[in-house]
Amino acid sequence: MKRKKLPTGIANLREMREEDHYYVDKTAYALRLIDEGKYYFLSRPRRFGKSLFLDTLAELFQANEPLFRGLYAHEHWDWGIKYPVIRLSFGGGLMRDRAQLEAKFRELLDINQARLGISCRQPTAPGCFAELIQSAEQKYGQRVVILVDEYDKPIVDNLTQPELAREMRDGLRNFYSVIKDNDAQIKFAFITGVSKFSKVSIFSGLNNIKDITIDRRYSAICGYTEDDLDEVFTPELEGLDRQQIRDWYNGYNWTGEAVYNPYDLLLLFDSHLFRCYWFETGTPTFLIDVMTGRGVFSPNLESLSGDEDLLGSFDIDHISTEALLWQTGYLTIQGQRHTGARIDYQLGYPNLEVRSALNNSLTKALMGDPSQASRGMSRLYDSLMSGDFERLHQHFHSLYASIPHDWYRNNPITQYEGYWASVFYSHFAALGLDIRLEDATNQGRLDMAVLFNGQVWLFEFKVVELVPEGKALEQLKAKHYAEKYLSLKQPIHLIGIEFSREQRNLVGFEVESLDQSMSPG
């Protein structure tokens, strides 16, 4: 298989096909959607290929047959029919008031009028949109296809200002209502975004829109599967460890087949360096602010749950933490179970990139001093590599001591009990180490296990104002937590960590190392 160009940052089918880029064929999904329905909604995180899929739909409906040669759709589509396509994308630029939103509407409508050769006379944006739909059907003799990309961006960009976000929502609702009112003239509509806002609040009246966000049949509609890597990208895999690729970038799942983030893989293939490419392109400070403001216990991010209503309850006046993290791609669906009439979804980190990078950002936010947090991670790694427990003790004592006094005084997050363990856990998780939280044994649940450098580190946390000193190590021993790891034949270290809310630091750090040859019991 010969090497092709990497389509990094390219979201249009024509360029990819005409200039010999790698292309993962998603046209079977497109045909299935068209055959089985009319109105669709899909939510996916940023940089997952939503725009490319919409462009593929546009080229398909516009009957650009040469672009589909060799693809699934080529032998299964009627190339003799050409449909008028209206494309709307709110991805470009920021809209900070209603007037700017209205200007964006007019800009998008002007572009579509020019492309379709239609001039609208209606003075308002909704009126022009309706006129455009009706005129396009009359001119081309076929019903209209409407494709909307990043439908929610004007709202998401303004979530920190709820009043403005509500204005944007109302403006979008007024505009999108045109789709409902012109149902007879519409052949197909596909709407995408990052956030799944309430259909009632945005698509008022469009009750027959089908949400395929967590439809297992469409889990891989965006992103690359394992088979895609084997069938399309084989020339790029040389010199890369396949398991390392999986650990870093695979694992995004919407109840069906898991996928890789395309942006990560394309940059990895280009550089052959494992980095947090997707995370670095724009993790919102809003996300970190919400998590710290709500006192989110960061170890819990390893395993959360929520039902479909909770995951979909993303609106301006209430955004659940689970919905926010899931819809933005920082947590993914790892399993599901029926609980009576409900479906509970188990959520967790998709991969090493997200776990490491998100906890890196959280550590800096929890400590209030990003530079200290960054330097601390290097010291933690060196301390673990050396196996020097006194050095590790001093490292954490210095780490907590470096948190500014004003940070405690001005931030309510420092008052909740989980703050100390959150800093500790996120500090480790930012390094991308093999961490197991609340690891179940037949004796109970261990707070944290770390497997690193051929050794096992078992941690138990206590706050001395709540539990007498010395109880952390005592519990580690009494519960026989080490027995689960004896089969690894590696040194095992039991470490009791005790915090004091009053002293704002560690007041207990007890270690007991076990001979790996010890027998259970």
Image (cartoon, grey):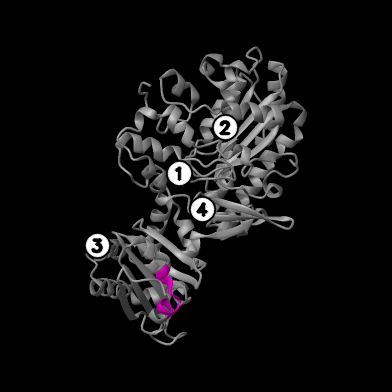
- Where does the C terminus fall, quadrant-wise? bottom left
Pointer 1 with pointer 4, Cβ within 8 A: no
What distance separates the C-alpha of mark 1 from that of mark 4? 12 Å
Q: Which residue is mark 3?
A: 385
Q: Which sits earlier in the primary sequence, circle 3 or circle 4?
A: 4
Dot 3 falls on a residue whose secondary structure is: helix
Q: Residue at x 48, y 59 (%)?
A: 302
Q: Which residue is mark 1?
A: 250
Q: Which residue is mark 2?
A: 108
What distance separates the C-alpha of mark 1 from that of mark 3? 28 Å
Q: Residue at x 33, y 44 (%)?
A: 274
Count neighbours of disc 1 (C-alpha within 10 A) and say few if under 14, some if 14 to 19, many if 20 or more.
Answer: many
Residue reaching furthest front? 519
Name the mark nearer the viewer: 1 or 4. Answer: 1
Three-letter amino acid code at the position of disc 1: Asn
Q: Which sits earlier in the primary sequence, circle 1 or circle 3?
A: 1
Three-letter amino acid code at the position of disc 2: Leu
Find the magenta span and give its range.
475-483
Count neighbours of disc 2 (C-alpha within 10 A) and say few if under 14, some if 14 to 19, many if 20 or more.
Answer: some
Q: Which sits earlier in the primary sequence, circle 1 or circle 4?
A: 1
Three-letter amino acid code at the position of disc 4: Leu
Q: Nearer the viewer, residue 497 or 97?
A: 497
- Residue 53 x %, y %: 55, 31
Q: Which residue is mark 4?
A: 331
Q: Which sits earlier in the primary sequence, circle 3 or circle 2?
A: 2
